[in-house]
Image (cartoon, helix red, strand yellow):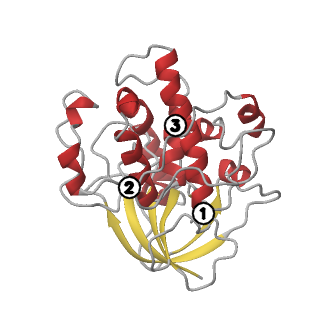
Amino acid sequence: MATSTLAGSAFLDPPEAAAATAPAPAAAADSQPGTRRRRQGAPQREGLLPPLRTLGQAVDRLREQLDERVQAGVDEHGAPNVALPGDAPVRAAFYTLLPTVQQRALFLEYASQPRAWPRIRGLFGAPPYGFLHPGDAATLSASGFARGRVNMTFDASRMVSTYAHFGVGQLQDEMEREYNVVVRGKTPPDDEDPLLFDLKEAVTGTQLVLQVRVKRRSRDQRVAIFKGGAQRAQLEFPRPGNQVTLAPKQAIQRLLGAVGPPPERTVRVSRVAPRSANCSTAAMLVELV
């Protein structure tokens, strides 16, 4: 299951993180917006990892993991563009924890390092990447990261992830639909901002842009759910006007260092924009109630 993939990563399993190999030395800072090299006082991987509170802390910890996975490719003489054991949890964490501003900046940081080029496919998945801008394609070659791929970016920036680039989901509702918070409020997220999906102190009336994913199921499973009636919403996106109650997934609870029942927040849906016809992901504009 995807959830266990993220839960098994060093982000969410402190005992495993404490035993992990120390990360490779950090390179010099670059000028990409939305991220930067490890700040003084950032959490170190000695003993138990502290809970994450800000986007910057998540970027720092992801960078440690990416450095380790790039070095693993060197140490294990990994074939270019072939994933290694241990890549999947880091890839899932990248797509689950960071909004697109930080995703783009961190990706471009590694795409600019020749030693990381053979590891791009394993650590970030295959292109095109929804977090890149159309202009980024001029400096990158999709065929170098995935055979047969032509485009590094989509023709226009999209707010909706593909199913594969969704991650494992930050929040869920009672119908097993999964959600990621990609915009909170009206300003682009900065490294000093709290993690966007930590909603326990968010004020009523705050607008959020969410991505929602409906789980893929076999035809027989869909028919059984459809006939059941009450659970039919498991197959559909929420609709404008619906109120949906969201709670952090168990792995996210551990990430935040929370104990006890997961805190629930209710949102009212204003707009829904599916990625395409018959797709499994959509963007939603909602308001906290």
Most foreground residue, 111 or 215 = 111
Answer few, some or many: residues within 10 Å of disc 2's Cα (few below 14, many 20 plus, some between 14 and 19).
many
Q: Considering the image in quadrants, where does the N terminus appear? A: top right
**The disc labelled 1 sits on which kind of residue?**
Leu
**The disc labelled 2 sits on which kind of residue?**
Thr
Q: Residue furthest toward the bottom?
A: 205
Label whose residue precedes the other's in the sequence (1 or 2): 1
Q: Secondary structure at mark 2?
A: strand
Q: Residue furthest toward the top?
A: 77
Residue 224 x/y as whole percent = 48, 45
Answer few, some or many: residues within 10 Å of disc 1's Cα (few below 14, many 20 plus, some between 14 and 19).
many
Kindly identify which residue carries mark 1: 195
- Drawn side of residue 39 relative to residue 282, left or right: right
Estimate the spatial distance between the alpha carbons at disc 2 and disc 3, rounded to whole Å: 27 Å
Label whose residue precedes the other's in the sequence (1 or 3): 3
- Drawn side of residue 32 relative to residue 53, left or right: left
Most foreground residue, 98 or 113 = 113
Residue 17 x/y as whole percent = 71, 35
Kindly identify which residue carries mark 2: 281
Q: Nearer the viewer, mark 1 or mark 2?
A: 1
Q: Is residue 217 above or below residue 24?
A: below
